Image (cartoon, coloured by chain):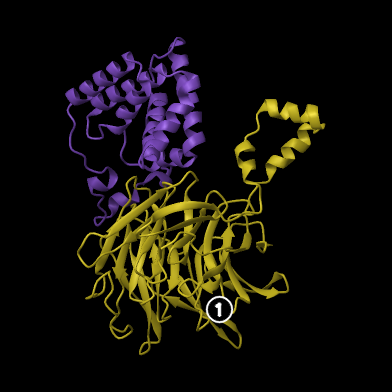
Chain colours: A yellow, B purple
Amino acid sequence: MANPEVNLLFHQPIADHSFSADRNVLAVTRDNSVELYERQGHGFVLKDELKGHDKVVTSVDIAPKSGKIVTCSQDRNALVWEPSPTGWRPTLVLLRINRAATFVRWSPSEAKFAVGSGARVISVCYFEEENDWWVSKHLKKPIRSTILSLDWHPNSVLLAAGSADAHARVFSAFIKGVDQKPEPSPWGERLPFNTVCGEFLNNSGGWVHDVAFSPSGNALAFTAHDSSVTIVYPSGPDQPPQAIMSVSTHQLPFTTLTWITEEEIVAAGHDCEPFRFRGSIDQGWSSVGALDSSKSRSSSIARESSARDLFKQMDLKGKTVHSATADDIQLKTIHQNTITAIRPYAGDAAQGGVKQISSSGVDGRIVIFPIGGARPTFTH
Amino acid sequence: MAANQNWRLIDVDALDPELQYPAELLSPPFDPVPLSTVQQLSQQCRGLLQRGENAEALRIALQNVPYGADDAGKDLHCTTIVEILGSIKQSEMSTTLNTIYSSSEAGSELLDTLMKYLYKGMAKKDAPQVGSGGASGGMSVLLSWHEKVVEIAGLGSIVRVMTDRRTV
Protein backbone atom coordinates (compact mmCIF):
# COMPACT_ATOMS: atom_id res chain seq x y z
CA MET A 1 0.00 0.00 0.00
CA ALA A 2 1.26 3.42 -0.90
CA ASN A 3 2.27 5.74 1.91
CA PRO A 4 0.15 8.73 2.91
CA GLU A 5 1.24 12.03 1.38
CA VAL A 6 1.93 14.56 4.12
CA ASN A 7 1.97 18.32 3.54
CA LEU A 8 2.76 20.64 6.42
CA LEU A 9 1.43 23.98 5.16
CA PHE A 10 1.89 26.16 8.25
CA HIS A 11 1.75 25.98 12.02
CA GLN A 12 -1.84 27.11 12.45
CA PRO A 13 -5.10 25.22 12.62
CA ILE A 14 -6.92 24.40 9.40
CA ALA A 15 -10.66 24.42 10.04
CA ASP A 16 -11.59 23.16 6.59
CA HIS A 17 -10.04 22.40 3.21
CA SER A 18 -11.28 21.74 -0.29
CA PHE A 19 -9.66 20.55 -3.52
CA SER A 20 -10.65 21.60 -7.03
CA ALA A 21 -12.07 18.87 -9.29
CA ASP A 22 -8.68 18.28 -11.00
CA ARG A 23 -7.01 18.24 -7.53
CA ASN A 24 -4.49 20.90 -8.62
CA VAL A 25 -5.84 23.69 -6.44
CA LEU A 26 -6.19 23.36 -2.69
CA ALA A 27 -8.12 25.89 -0.62
CA VAL A 28 -7.47 25.98 3.12
CA THR A 29 -8.79 28.28 5.81
CA ARG A 30 -6.21 30.23 7.78
CA ASP A 31 -7.42 32.77 10.33
CA ASN A 32 -9.45 35.45 8.55
CA SER A 33 -8.53 34.42 5.03
CA VAL A 34 -8.50 31.45 2.70
CA GLU A 35 -5.24 30.45 1.05
CA LEU A 36 -5.13 28.86 -2.39
CA TYR A 37 -2.30 26.44 -3.02
CA GLU A 38 -1.29 24.92 -6.33
CA ARG A 39 0.21 21.49 -6.70
CA GLN A 40 3.82 21.52 -7.83
CA GLY A 41 5.50 18.15 -7.97
CA HIS A 42 5.09 16.54 -4.59
CA GLY A 43 4.14 19.65 -2.68
CA PHE A 44 1.91 22.67 -2.70
CA VAL A 45 2.89 26.28 -3.39
CA LEU A 46 0.93 29.27 -2.15
CA LYS A 47 -0.65 31.02 -5.15
CA ASP A 48 -3.33 33.32 -3.90
CA GLU A 49 -5.07 34.58 -0.81
CA LEU A 50 -8.77 35.30 -0.53
CA LYS A 51 -9.17 38.20 1.88
CA GLY A 52 -12.65 39.47 2.53
CA HIS A 53 -13.78 38.19 5.89
CA ASP A 54 -12.90 40.10 9.02
CA LYS A 55 -13.25 37.20 11.46
CA VAL A 56 -12.10 33.58 11.47
CA VAL A 57 -13.11 31.65 8.36
CA THR A 58 -14.90 28.50 9.46
CA SER A 59 -15.54 26.63 6.21
CA VAL A 60 -14.65 26.59 2.53
CA ASP A 61 -15.97 24.64 -0.44
CA ILE A 62 -14.93 24.60 -4.10
CA ALA A 63 -17.69 23.70 -6.56
CA PRO A 64 -16.27 20.86 -8.69
CA LYS A 65 -17.86 21.90 -12.01
CA SER A 66 -18.02 25.71 -11.95
CA GLY A 67 -14.88 26.21 -9.87
CA LYS A 68 -16.61 28.85 -7.74
CA ILE A 69 -15.46 29.00 -4.13
CA VAL A 70 -17.80 29.67 -1.24
CA THR A 71 -16.49 30.63 2.20
CA CYS A 72 -18.20 31.46 5.46
CA SER A 73 -16.91 33.02 8.63
CA GLN A 74 -17.57 33.99 12.20
CA ASP A 75 -18.26 37.51 10.88
CA ARG A 76 -21.74 36.13 9.94
CA ASN A 77 -21.13 36.42 6.20
CA ALA A 78 -20.68 34.07 3.31
CA LEU A 79 -18.77 35.07 0.19
CA VAL A 80 -18.89 33.49 -3.26
CA TRP A 81 -15.57 33.88 -5.08
CA GLU A 82 -15.45 33.82 -8.89
CA PRO A 83 -12.34 34.05 -11.03
CA SER A 84 -12.04 37.25 -13.07
CA PRO A 85 -9.18 38.78 -15.13
CA THR A 86 -8.16 40.85 -12.10
CA GLY A 87 -8.18 37.95 -9.66
CA TRP A 88 -10.80 36.35 -7.47
CA ARG A 89 -13.89 38.53 -7.13
CA PRO A 90 -16.04 38.10 -3.99
CA THR A 91 -19.81 38.49 -3.88
CA LEU A 92 -21.47 38.97 -0.52
CA VAL A 93 -24.38 36.69 0.27
CA LEU A 94 -27.20 37.94 2.49
CA LEU A 95 -27.45 35.22 5.12
CA ARG A 96 -29.63 37.22 7.55
CA ILE A 97 -28.12 35.59 10.64
CA ASN A 98 -27.04 37.14 13.93
CA ARG A 99 -24.48 34.52 14.95
CA ALA A 100 -21.34 33.04 13.43
CA ALA A 101 -21.64 31.01 10.24
CA THR A 102 -20.15 27.60 10.95
CA PHE A 103 -20.33 25.42 7.87
CA VAL A 104 -20.93 25.77 4.13
CA ARG A 105 -21.37 23.27 1.30
CA TRP A 106 -22.38 23.53 -2.38
CA SER A 107 -25.26 21.32 -3.46
CA PRO A 108 -24.25 18.70 -6.06
CA SER A 109 -26.17 20.71 -8.71
CA GLU A 110 -24.08 23.77 -7.73
CA ALA A 111 -27.15 25.99 -8.07
CA LYS A 112 -27.44 26.36 -4.31
CA PHE A 113 -25.37 26.17 -1.20
CA ALA A 114 -26.30 25.84 2.45
CA VAL A 115 -24.76 27.67 5.39
CA GLY A 116 -25.12 26.43 8.95
CA SER A 117 -24.86 28.90 11.81
CA GLY A 118 -25.01 29.53 15.51
CA ALA A 119 -28.28 31.38 15.00
CA ARG A 120 -30.14 28.02 14.94
CA VAL A 121 -30.94 28.38 11.25
CA ILE A 122 -29.60 26.97 8.01
CA SER A 123 -29.49 29.52 5.21
CA VAL A 124 -30.15 27.87 1.86
CA CYS A 125 -28.75 30.28 -0.72
CA TYR A 126 -29.43 30.53 -4.45
CA PHE A 127 -28.73 33.07 -7.17
CA GLU A 128 -31.49 35.38 -8.33
CA GLU A 129 -30.82 36.37 -11.92
CA GLU A 130 -33.25 39.34 -11.96
CA ASN A 131 -31.62 41.10 -9.05
CA ASP A 132 -28.12 39.74 -9.70
CA TRP A 133 -27.50 38.64 -6.14
CA TRP A 134 -27.48 35.64 -3.85
CA VAL A 135 -30.52 35.35 -1.60
CA SER A 136 -31.20 32.93 1.21
CA LYS A 137 -34.15 31.08 2.65
CA HIS A 138 -34.04 29.89 6.24
CA LEU A 139 -34.54 26.35 7.48
CA LYS A 140 -35.53 27.03 11.03
CA LYS A 141 -37.76 24.49 12.70
CA PRO A 142 -37.11 22.46 14.80
CA ILE A 143 -33.44 23.39 15.25
CA ARG A 144 -32.60 24.11 18.88
CA SER A 145 -28.92 24.88 18.75
CA THR A 146 -25.90 25.60 16.58
CA ILE A 147 -25.58 23.73 13.29
CA LEU A 148 -22.16 22.08 13.19
CA SER A 149 -22.26 20.27 9.86
CA LEU A 150 -24.26 19.85 6.66
CA ASP A 151 -24.37 17.35 3.84
CA TRP A 152 -26.36 17.34 0.60
CA HIS A 153 -28.23 14.35 -0.75
CA PRO A 154 -27.18 13.46 -4.33
CA ASN A 155 -30.55 14.85 -5.55
CA SER A 156 -29.61 18.37 -4.35
CA VAL A 157 -32.94 18.73 -2.58
CA LEU A 158 -32.47 16.92 0.71
CA LEU A 159 -30.07 18.37 3.23
CA ALA A 160 -28.75 16.67 6.37
CA ALA A 161 -27.69 18.76 9.33
CA GLY A 162 -25.88 17.87 12.54
CA SER A 163 -26.58 20.11 15.47
CA ALA A 164 -25.29 20.82 18.96
CA ASP A 165 -28.74 19.87 20.30
CA ALA A 166 -27.65 16.24 19.74
CA HIS A 167 -29.94 15.68 16.74
CA ALA A 168 -29.12 14.82 13.17
CA ARG A 169 -31.91 15.99 10.90
CA VAL A 170 -32.84 15.64 7.27
CA PHE A 171 -34.62 18.61 5.69
CA SER A 172 -36.01 19.40 2.30
CA ALA A 173 -34.27 22.45 0.83
CA PHE A 174 -36.43 22.50 -2.30
CA ILE A 175 -36.39 25.91 -4.01
CA LYS A 176 -39.08 26.55 -6.61
CA GLY A 177 -37.62 27.57 -9.94
CA VAL A 178 -34.14 26.32 -9.03
CA ASP A 179 -34.72 22.63 -8.38
CA GLN A 180 -36.35 19.88 -10.40
CA LYS A 181 -38.94 17.82 -8.58
CA PRO A 182 -36.88 15.00 -7.00
CA GLU A 183 -37.44 11.31 -7.57
CA PRO A 184 -39.25 9.64 -4.66
CA SER A 185 -36.79 8.21 -2.13
CA PRO A 186 -37.09 6.52 1.27
CA TRP A 187 -36.90 10.01 2.76
CA GLY A 188 -40.23 11.05 1.22
CA GLU A 189 -42.10 11.96 -1.95
CA ARG A 190 -43.68 15.36 -1.49
CA LEU A 191 -40.95 17.66 -0.31
CA PRO A 192 -41.86 21.35 0.04
CA PHE A 193 -39.22 23.61 1.61
CA ASN A 194 -38.51 22.91 5.32
CA THR A 195 -40.14 19.46 5.37
CA VAL A 196 -38.45 17.55 8.18
CA CYS A 197 -37.81 14.10 6.69
CA GLY A 198 -36.11 12.67 9.72
CA GLU A 199 -34.86 13.56 13.16
CA PHE A 200 -32.42 11.20 14.82
CA LEU A 201 -30.73 10.94 18.17
CA ASN A 202 -28.57 8.20 19.55
CA ASN A 203 -28.84 6.77 23.06
CA SER A 204 -26.27 8.77 24.89
CA GLY A 205 -27.00 11.90 22.87
CA GLY A 206 -23.74 13.77 22.38
CA TRP A 207 -23.77 16.81 20.11
CA VAL A 208 -23.46 15.85 16.46
CA HIS A 209 -20.12 16.74 14.88
CA ASP A 210 -20.67 15.56 11.32
CA VAL A 211 -23.34 14.06 9.07
CA ALA A 212 -23.08 12.36 5.70
CA PHE A 213 -25.45 10.75 3.23
CA SER A 214 -24.36 7.40 1.82
CA PRO A 215 -23.36 7.43 -1.89
CA SER A 216 -26.87 6.30 -2.88
CA GLY A 217 -28.44 8.79 -0.50
CA ASN A 218 -30.51 6.02 1.08
CA ALA A 219 -28.69 5.99 4.41
CA LEU A 220 -27.38 8.65 6.75
CA ALA A 221 -24.34 8.46 9.00
CA PHE A 222 -23.53 10.82 11.83
CA THR A 223 -20.87 11.04 14.46
CA ALA A 224 -21.42 12.58 17.86
CA HIS A 225 -19.34 13.66 20.82
CA ASP A 226 -19.98 10.35 22.60
CA SER A 227 -17.31 8.75 20.36
CA SER A 228 -19.95 6.98 18.33
CA VAL A 229 -20.81 6.58 14.68
CA THR A 230 -24.50 6.06 13.98
CA ILE A 231 -25.98 4.86 10.69
CA VAL A 232 -29.67 5.37 9.94
CA TYR A 233 -31.64 3.50 7.27
CA PRO A 234 -34.97 5.23 6.59
CA SER A 235 -38.02 3.23 5.58
CA GLY A 236 -40.42 5.83 4.24
CA PRO A 237 -42.12 9.12 4.96
CA ASP A 238 -43.63 9.48 8.46
CA GLN A 239 -42.43 6.03 9.48
CA PRO A 240 -39.76 5.07 11.97
CA PRO A 241 -36.50 4.14 10.25
CA GLN A 242 -35.81 0.52 9.30
CA ALA A 243 -32.72 0.51 11.44
CA ILE A 244 -30.56 2.81 13.54
CA MET A 245 -27.16 1.28 14.21
CA SER A 246 -24.83 2.93 16.65
CA VAL A 247 -21.20 1.93 17.07
CA SER A 248 -19.69 3.11 20.35
CA THR A 249 -15.93 3.15 20.04
CA HIS A 250 -12.97 3.09 22.39
CA GLN A 251 -11.57 6.24 20.79
CA LEU A 252 -11.93 9.91 21.52
CA PRO A 253 -14.80 11.56 19.62
CA PHE A 254 -14.75 11.83 15.84
CA THR A 255 -15.29 15.25 14.31
CA THR A 256 -15.65 14.29 10.67
CA LEU A 257 -16.65 11.32 8.56
CA THR A 258 -17.04 10.33 4.92
CA TRP A 259 -18.46 7.34 3.06
CA ILE A 260 -15.99 5.24 1.07
CA THR A 261 -18.51 2.85 -0.42
CA GLU A 262 -22.12 2.08 0.44
CA GLU A 263 -20.77 -0.26 3.10
CA GLU A 264 -17.75 1.54 4.43
CA ILE A 265 -17.14 4.79 6.33
CA VAL A 266 -13.98 6.54 7.45
CA ALA A 267 -14.19 8.80 10.51
CA ALA A 268 -11.50 10.91 12.16
CA GLY A 269 -11.23 13.42 14.97
CA HIS A 270 -9.62 13.94 18.34
CA ASP A 271 -7.55 10.75 18.11
CA CYS A 272 -5.64 12.38 15.22
CA GLU A 273 -5.99 9.42 12.89
CA PRO A 274 -8.74 8.08 10.61
CA PHE A 275 -10.65 4.97 11.61
CA ARG A 276 -12.60 2.66 9.40
CA PHE A 277 -16.11 1.28 9.86
CA ARG A 278 -17.74 -1.46 7.85
CA GLY A 279 -21.21 -2.88 7.72
CA SER A 280 -24.61 -2.97 6.12
CA ILE A 281 -28.20 -3.05 7.21
CA ASP A 282 -28.13 -6.87 7.37
CA GLN A 283 -24.71 -7.36 8.93
CA GLY A 284 -24.69 -4.48 11.37
CA TRP A 285 -21.83 -2.03 11.62
CA SER A 286 -18.54 -2.31 13.43
CA SER A 287 -15.19 -0.62 13.71
CA VAL A 288 -12.41 -2.34 11.77
CA GLY A 289 -9.43 -0.39 13.01
CA ALA A 290 -7.23 2.53 12.07
CA LEU A 291 -6.41 3.61 8.53
CA ASP A 292 -3.07 5.07 9.50
CA SER A 293 -1.21 1.74 9.45
CA SER A 294 2.28 3.19 9.10
CA LYS A 295 2.86 3.24 12.82
CA SER A 296 3.14 0.34 15.21
CA ARG A 297 -0.16 -0.13 16.94
CA SER A 298 1.32 -1.71 20.03
CA SER A 299 3.01 1.54 20.95
CA SER A 300 -0.25 3.19 21.87
CA ILE A 301 -0.65 0.86 24.81
CA ALA A 302 2.76 1.69 26.17
CA ARG A 303 2.23 5.38 25.49
CA GLU A 304 2.01 6.27 29.13
CA SER A 305 5.44 5.35 30.30
CA SER A 306 5.74 5.16 34.03
CA ALA A 307 8.62 6.53 36.01
CA ARG A 308 9.80 2.95 36.48
CA ASP A 309 9.94 2.43 32.72
CA LEU A 310 11.86 5.64 32.39
CA PHE A 311 14.55 4.47 34.80
CA LYS A 312 14.61 1.08 33.13
CA GLN A 313 15.27 2.75 29.78
CA MET A 314 18.09 4.77 31.31
CA ASP A 315 19.54 1.70 32.96
CA LEU A 316 19.33 -0.77 30.08
CA LYS A 317 19.69 1.39 27.01
CA GLY A 318 21.60 4.33 28.38
CA LYS A 319 18.81 6.66 27.30
CA THR A 320 18.93 9.96 29.06
CA VAL A 321 15.85 11.54 30.53
CA HIS A 322 16.09 14.15 27.82
CA SER A 323 16.01 11.77 24.87
CA ALA A 324 13.31 9.70 26.52
CA THR A 325 11.03 12.71 26.71
CA ALA A 326 11.86 13.71 23.15
CA ASP A 327 10.04 10.56 22.05
CA ASP A 328 6.99 11.68 23.92
CA ILE A 329 6.72 15.05 22.21
CA GLN A 330 5.61 13.53 18.92
CA LEU A 331 2.38 11.65 18.57
CA LYS A 332 2.63 8.28 16.88
CA THR A 333 0.03 9.39 14.34
CA ILE A 334 0.70 11.41 11.17
CA HIS A 335 -1.49 14.29 12.23
CA GLN A 336 -0.14 15.85 15.39
CA ASN A 337 -3.47 17.29 16.48
CA THR A 338 -7.21 16.87 15.95
CA ILE A 339 -8.34 16.14 12.40
CA THR A 340 -10.93 18.76 11.45
CA ALA A 341 -12.15 17.55 8.07
CA ILE A 342 -11.80 14.57 5.75
CA ARG A 343 -12.98 14.52 2.16
CA PRO A 344 -12.82 12.09 -0.75
CA TYR A 345 -9.72 12.79 -2.86
CA ALA A 346 -9.64 10.13 -5.56
CA GLY A 347 -12.34 7.72 -6.68
CA ASP A 348 -16.09 7.98 -6.42
CA ALA A 349 -18.00 6.53 -3.50
CA ALA A 350 -20.94 5.75 -5.79
CA GLN A 351 -18.82 4.01 -8.44
CA GLY A 352 -16.15 1.61 -7.25
CA GLY A 353 -15.39 3.39 -4.00
CA VAL A 354 -13.13 6.19 -2.83
CA LYS A 355 -9.45 5.31 -3.30
CA GLN A 356 -7.85 8.21 -1.42
CA ILE A 357 -9.06 10.71 1.16
CA SER A 358 -7.61 14.06 2.14
CA SER A 359 -7.60 15.30 5.71
CA SER A 360 -6.85 18.61 7.39
CA GLY A 361 -5.92 19.12 11.00
CA VAL A 362 -5.38 21.60 13.79
CA ASP A 363 -1.67 20.93 13.26
CA GLY A 364 -1.70 22.71 9.87
CA ARG A 365 -1.18 19.51 7.90
CA ILE A 366 -2.98 18.27 4.82
CA VAL A 367 -2.58 14.51 4.48
CA ILE A 368 -3.71 12.32 1.60
CA PHE A 369 -4.40 8.79 2.83
CA PRO A 370 -4.69 5.83 0.47
CA ILE A 371 -7.64 3.55 1.21
CA GLY A 372 -6.17 0.09 0.76
CA GLY A 373 -8.39 -2.94 0.31
CA ALA A 374 -11.54 -0.91 0.40
CA ARG A 375 -13.67 -3.90 -0.51
CA PRO A 376 -15.76 -5.24 2.35
CA THR A 377 -14.49 -8.66 3.30
CA PHE A 378 -17.69 -10.32 4.42
CA THR A 379 -19.74 -12.48 2.07
CA HIS A 380 -23.25 -11.70 0.92
CA MET B 1 -25.18 48.48 32.18
CA ALA B 2 -22.47 48.86 34.74
CA ALA B 3 -19.06 49.43 33.26
CA ASN B 4 -17.48 46.79 35.43
CA GLN B 5 -19.95 44.07 34.45
CA ASN B 6 -18.33 41.04 32.86
CA TRP B 7 -20.07 41.03 29.49
CA ARG B 8 -18.88 37.52 28.75
CA LEU B 9 -21.18 36.26 31.49
CA ILE B 10 -24.32 37.95 30.17
CA ASP B 11 -26.81 35.33 29.06
CA VAL B 12 -27.71 36.81 25.67
CA ASP B 13 -30.00 33.89 24.89
CA ALA B 14 -32.28 34.94 27.75
CA LEU B 15 -33.19 37.99 25.67
CA ASP B 16 -34.28 35.87 22.70
CA PRO B 17 -38.03 35.17 22.91
CA GLU B 18 -37.81 32.47 20.24
CA LEU B 19 -35.29 30.42 22.13
CA GLN B 20 -36.78 27.55 24.07
CA TYR B 21 -35.12 24.46 25.33
CA PRO B 22 -37.72 21.80 25.95
CA ALA B 23 -37.00 19.85 29.13
CA GLU B 24 -36.68 16.53 27.29
CA LEU B 25 -33.86 17.98 25.21
CA LEU B 26 -31.69 18.47 28.26
CA SER B 27 -32.72 15.35 30.14
CA PRO B 28 -34.61 12.55 28.40
CA PRO B 29 -37.85 11.51 30.13
CA PHE B 30 -37.87 8.34 32.23
CA ASP B 31 -40.64 6.61 34.16
CA PRO B 32 -40.31 7.46 37.84
CA VAL B 33 -38.72 4.72 39.93
CA PRO B 34 -39.89 4.58 43.57
CA LEU B 35 -37.29 4.38 46.31
CA SER B 36 -38.61 0.97 47.40
CA THR B 37 -37.60 -0.59 44.07
CA VAL B 38 -34.06 0.70 44.48
CA GLN B 39 -34.00 -0.64 48.04
CA GLN B 40 -35.17 -4.06 46.87
CA LEU B 41 -32.46 -4.10 44.22
CA SER B 42 -29.91 -3.10 46.82
CA GLN B 43 -30.99 -6.02 49.05
CA GLN B 44 -30.91 -8.44 46.13
CA CYS B 45 -27.34 -7.38 45.36
CA ARG B 46 -26.33 -7.74 49.04
CA GLY B 47 -27.76 -11.23 49.02
CA LEU B 48 -25.66 -12.11 45.98
CA LEU B 49 -22.58 -10.65 47.66
CA GLN B 50 -23.13 -12.84 50.73
CA ARG B 51 -23.26 -15.90 48.51
CA GLY B 52 -20.02 -14.78 46.88
CA GLU B 53 -21.53 -14.02 43.50
CA ASN B 54 -19.91 -10.60 43.30
CA ALA B 55 -19.66 -10.39 39.51
CA GLU B 56 -23.31 -11.30 39.12
CA ALA B 57 -24.27 -8.66 41.69
CA LEU B 58 -22.36 -6.03 39.73
CA ARG B 59 -23.97 -7.05 36.45
CA ILE B 60 -27.47 -6.89 37.90
CA ALA B 61 -26.81 -3.51 39.51
CA LEU B 62 -25.52 -2.12 36.21
CA GLN B 63 -28.39 -3.53 34.20
CA ASN B 64 -31.06 -1.99 36.40
CA VAL B 65 -30.04 1.63 36.61
CA PRO B 66 -32.82 3.76 38.18
CA TYR B 67 -32.57 6.71 35.74
CA GLY B 68 -36.05 7.79 36.79
CA ALA B 69 -35.43 7.71 40.53
CA ASP B 70 -35.18 10.79 42.73
CA ASP B 71 -31.89 11.90 44.28
CA ALA B 72 -32.25 9.62 47.31
CA GLY B 73 -32.86 6.60 45.06
CA LYS B 74 -29.93 7.47 42.80
CA ASP B 75 -27.62 7.95 45.79
CA LEU B 76 -28.67 4.62 47.26
CA HIS B 77 -27.96 2.83 43.98
CA CYS B 78 -24.57 4.51 43.80
CA THR B 79 -23.77 3.33 47.33
CA THR B 80 -24.85 -0.20 46.37
CA ILE B 81 -22.55 -0.24 43.37
CA VAL B 82 -19.61 1.21 45.28
CA GLU B 83 -20.14 -1.47 47.95
CA ILE B 84 -20.08 -4.20 45.31
CA LEU B 85 -16.94 -2.71 43.77
CA GLY B 86 -15.25 -2.65 47.18
CA SER B 87 -16.05 -6.31 47.74
CA ILE B 88 -14.32 -7.50 44.58
CA LYS B 89 -10.63 -8.23 44.99
CA GLN B 90 -8.09 -6.23 43.01
CA SER B 91 -6.88 -9.39 41.29
CA GLU B 92 -10.38 -10.20 40.07
CA MET B 93 -11.22 -6.77 38.66
CA SER B 94 -10.08 -7.41 35.09
CA THR B 95 -11.72 -10.83 34.83
CA THR B 96 -14.99 -9.45 36.21
CA LEU B 97 -14.97 -6.57 33.73
CA ASN B 98 -14.04 -8.82 30.82
CA THR B 99 -16.91 -11.17 31.64
CA ILE B 100 -19.36 -8.26 31.72
CA TYR B 101 -17.89 -6.73 28.57
CA SER B 102 -18.07 -9.87 26.48
CA SER B 103 -21.24 -11.31 28.03
CA SER B 104 -23.64 -9.56 25.68
CA GLU B 105 -24.07 -6.99 22.93
CA ALA B 106 -24.72 -4.34 25.54
CA GLY B 107 -21.52 -5.16 27.45
CA SER B 108 -19.79 -2.01 26.37
CA GLU B 109 -22.77 0.05 27.50
CA LEU B 110 -22.65 -1.60 30.94
CA LEU B 111 -19.05 -0.50 31.32
CA ASP B 112 -20.06 3.03 30.29
CA THR B 113 -22.65 2.91 33.08
CA LEU B 114 -20.06 1.66 35.53
CA MET B 115 -17.85 4.58 34.54
CA LYS B 116 -20.68 6.99 35.40
CA TYR B 117 -20.87 5.52 38.90
CA LEU B 118 -17.10 5.66 39.32
CA TYR B 119 -17.21 9.39 38.66
CA LYS B 120 -20.27 9.86 40.84
CA GLY B 121 -18.59 7.92 43.63
CA MET B 122 -15.46 10.04 43.34
CA ALA B 123 -17.50 13.24 43.27
CA LYS B 124 -19.16 12.53 46.60
CA LYS B 125 -17.83 14.70 49.36
CA ASP B 126 -18.24 12.08 52.05
CA ALA B 127 -16.29 9.45 50.14
CA PRO B 128 -17.96 6.04 50.47
CA GLN B 129 -16.61 3.83 53.18
CA VAL B 130 -15.29 0.77 51.49
CA GLY B 131 -12.32 -1.43 52.18
CA SER B 132 -10.21 -1.02 55.26
CA GLY B 133 -8.63 2.34 54.48
CA GLY B 134 -11.73 4.38 55.22
CA ALA B 135 -12.46 7.35 52.98
CA SER B 136 -9.14 7.46 51.14
CA GLY B 137 -9.20 3.69 50.74
CA GLY B 138 -12.57 3.98 48.99
CA MET B 139 -11.18 6.51 46.59
CA SER B 140 -8.22 4.34 45.67
CA VAL B 141 -10.55 1.41 45.00
CA LEU B 142 -12.54 3.58 42.58
CA LEU B 143 -9.35 4.76 40.93
CA SER B 144 -8.11 1.26 40.30
CA TRP B 145 -11.50 0.34 38.85
CA HIS B 146 -11.29 3.42 36.66
CA GLU B 147 -7.94 2.28 35.30
CA LYS B 148 -9.26 -1.19 34.52
CA VAL B 149 -12.40 0.09 32.80
CA VAL B 150 -10.34 2.40 30.56
CA GLU B 151 -8.10 -0.56 29.65
CA ILE B 152 -11.10 -2.46 28.35
CA ALA B 153 -13.56 0.18 27.14
CA GLY B 154 -11.08 2.86 26.07
CA LEU B 155 -11.14 6.62 26.47
CA GLY B 156 -14.50 6.63 24.72
CA SER B 157 -16.14 5.50 27.96
CA ILE B 158 -14.91 8.63 29.76
CA VAL B 159 -16.18 10.89 26.98
CA ARG B 160 -19.56 9.17 27.15
CA VAL B 161 -19.85 9.92 30.86
CA MET B 162 -19.52 13.59 30.01
CA THR B 163 -21.95 13.66 27.09
CA ASP B 164 -24.63 11.26 28.27
CA ARG B 165 -27.77 12.99 29.48
CA ARG B 166 -29.01 9.87 31.25
CA THR B 167 -27.40 10.86 34.50
CA VAL B 168 -27.02 8.52 37.45
Subunit ID for the residue under disc 1: A
**Left/right of residue A200 with respect to residue A338 in the rendered view:** left
The secondary element bearing badge 1 is classed as: loop
A73 or A315: nearer the eye?
Answer: A315
Q: How far across and down, in percent of the image, does residue A274 sit?
A: 55, 55
Number of residues whose C-alpha sits closer than 10 Å to that of mark 1, classed few (under 14), some (14–19) or many (20 or more) = some
Residue A56 visible to the viewer: no
B168 or A376: nearer the eye?
Answer: A376
Quadrant in which the N terminus of chain A is drawn: bottom right
* Looking at the image, residue B22 lies above or below residue B97: below
Q: How far across and down, in percent of the image, does residue A219 sit?
A: 35, 65
Displayed quadrant of residue A325 = top right
Residue ID at (32%, 31%):
B62
Displayed quadrant of residue A313 = top right
Residue B113 visible to the viewer: yes
Quadrant in which the C terminus of chain A is drawn: bottom left
Q: How far across and down, in percent of the image, does residue A50 sit?
A: 58, 73
Displayed quadrant of residue A163 = bottom left
Residue ID at (54%, 73%):
A347
**Left/right of residue A23 with respect to residue B117 in the rendered view:** right
- Count up the numbered dots: 1
Residue ID at (58%, 61%):
A360
Q: For mark 1, what is the residue?
A: A21
* Looking at the image, residue A83 lies above or below residue B68: below
Residue ID at (77%, 35%):
A322
* Looking at the image, residue A150 lies above or below residue B119: below
A226 or A230: nearer the eye?
Answer: A230
B167 or A146: nearer the eye?
Answer: B167
Q: How far across and down, in percent of the image, does residue A285 sit?
A: 41, 54
Question: Which residue type does callout 1 highlight?
Answer: Ala
